[in-house]
Image (spheres, rainbow, N blue to C red):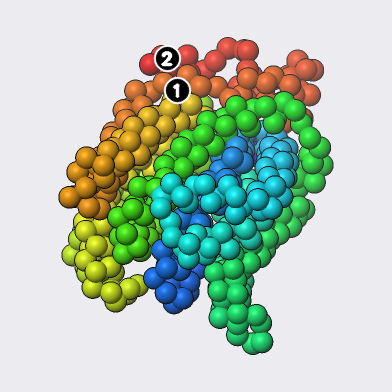
Amino acid sequence: MSLTVSNQSPPAGGLRRRDVTASLLVLALPIIGMTISRMLMGFIDFAMVSQLGTTAQAAISPATTFVFVISCLGMGIANGVQTFVSQADGRGAPHLAGGYTWQSIYVAAAVGLLSFPLAATVETWFGWIAALGQHGPELMALEVEYIRIALWSIAPSIVCIGLNGFFNGVQKPNIALVAVIASLVVNAFGNWLLIFGNWGFPEMGVAGAAVATVIGWLVRAGVMFVAMLLPSFHERFETRTSWRYDGRKMRELMRIGIPTSVQWLVDIGAWLVFMMIIVPPLGATVLAASNVGLQYMHLSFMPAVGLGIALSSKVGFAIGEKRPEEAELYTSVAARLMIAYMAAVGVLFFAARHGLMWLFNADPAVIEAGAAVLIWAAIFQAFDAMCITYMNALRGAGDTFWPAVMTFVCCWVIFVGGGLAATAVYPQFGLNGPWAMTTLYITVLGLLLWRRWTGGRWRSIDLSDRPEECLPAEACGEIEAGVPDPGVVVPGGPAPDFAAAEPDR
């Protein structure tokens, strides 16, 4: 029997570094376009809301971050779809891909139910959190106004992560790119209508940005969901017939995805504490400057995240083909590309720090504070590139538990604990204390993740230990009839020499 997989790569031994670079970039470019478009959605929200004044500018980033933290409960699990889909496709079992994707939709529905009680009681529970950060009444009112509505974006945003994972996993990222561009257009136009009350629409201010955000996520999810059901995807990945709840697939998805959810909760939750509790006591000027700095940091890391997503897919596919040496080669190439790009952006941050801040806020005090933020951001850019590279490579290999532990320790001991200590013990340092701890956190985490990858323990992880589903249906039929396909590795059978030679390091 001959099994043709159109996107299989040649053995790593026949690959040159420039060929790997080209292959990675071809896959990554539409994903980078997708992540940049997603960045632009937040960037446009921030820019438009900033026109409402410094207080609104100070409110929007903590509010959006808070909603994202809640979404992480399901996003990390849904993100595991890419690992299973890419590895299934790589080992010649594409029919499994649709089932994993559908399970992520059920995760979205379950987590989305949280929107009802949270939206109904937002003033109470968010008030407690805002009090810890000494938020003023005006600032808190704007944050509550945004969060109450934006909570309804939780379910569609998780659906989008699962569907992104499907299309990226099968190396068809253009579908996700089209979806995110459509949502970007809808969100930007909705902001223009609802924030400022154009064309007779009500002038809703910050609440208008939240409504446009929810609509944008719904459009993005809808475009990808319809595309997933097209005949071209159904024929290969069984996307229409695998819609039933599958307890085994769900458990597998959660086994890989829950550590990622925890990792995201820890990471983004730490940034939430930073923006809502550590920075606000330093004043609205510092908070606004930090918010602007974070927007510029998106310019740096979002394209790198796009490349990281492509890397995760390539690593997963290579491991599915039992070619760990190819996974290492792709990771090495990606690391060089990301470090070069983000280090260059760091130079830009340092050289143009005052001008970059002026584009968002002409207040001299905000410009001066923001310039200091961009200096710290410039210092940690290369280490942030290491974080993104090795986190995604490990995720593609299914190694998610220890990276989550590393992230937790670094986030809450160095970033949060160090930030709180810096402001309490050395208040004379102002914003430099907590931002120095941010730099230390990213530096240490980047080095730890690099060591985890080079240590090679990911090589011993096997996600294909299900004999009854590891092969395409027709291949299983031939094996049962006593005619095994020599090109397919059967779990439980003799492993190829290169797999048996890999130690558990």
Q: Residue 287, image x and y in percent? A: 35, 59
Frontmost residue, 504 versus 451: 451
- Residue at the extreme bottom: 199
Name above or below for residue 65 compared with residue 325.
below
Answer few, some or many: residues within 10 Å of disc 1's Cα (few below 14, many 20 plus, some between 14 and 19). Answer: many
Q: Is residue 423 left or right of residue 49?
A: left
For residue 273, which quarter of the picture?
A: top left
Which quarter of the figure is the N terminus placed in? top right
Mark 1 residue type: Arg
Name above or below for residue 306 compared with residue 85.
below
Q: Is residue 236 left or right of residue 343?
A: right
For residue 82, which quarter of the picture?
A: top right
The residue labelled by disc 2 is 504
The residue under the point 39% across, 70% down is 54
Between the residue at mark 2 and the residue at mark 1, the CA separation in whole angstroms equals: 7 Å
Mark 2 residue type: Asp
The residue under the point 31% across, 41% down is 420
| SS for callout 2 | loop
Residues at circles 2 and 1 in contact by the CB criterion of under 8 Å: yes
Frontmost residue, 18 versus 276: 276
Q: Is residue 316 left or right of residue 432?
A: right
Q: Give the total number of marks visible in the rendering.
A: 2
Name above or below for residue 425 compared with residue 367.
above
The residue labelled by disc 1 is 459
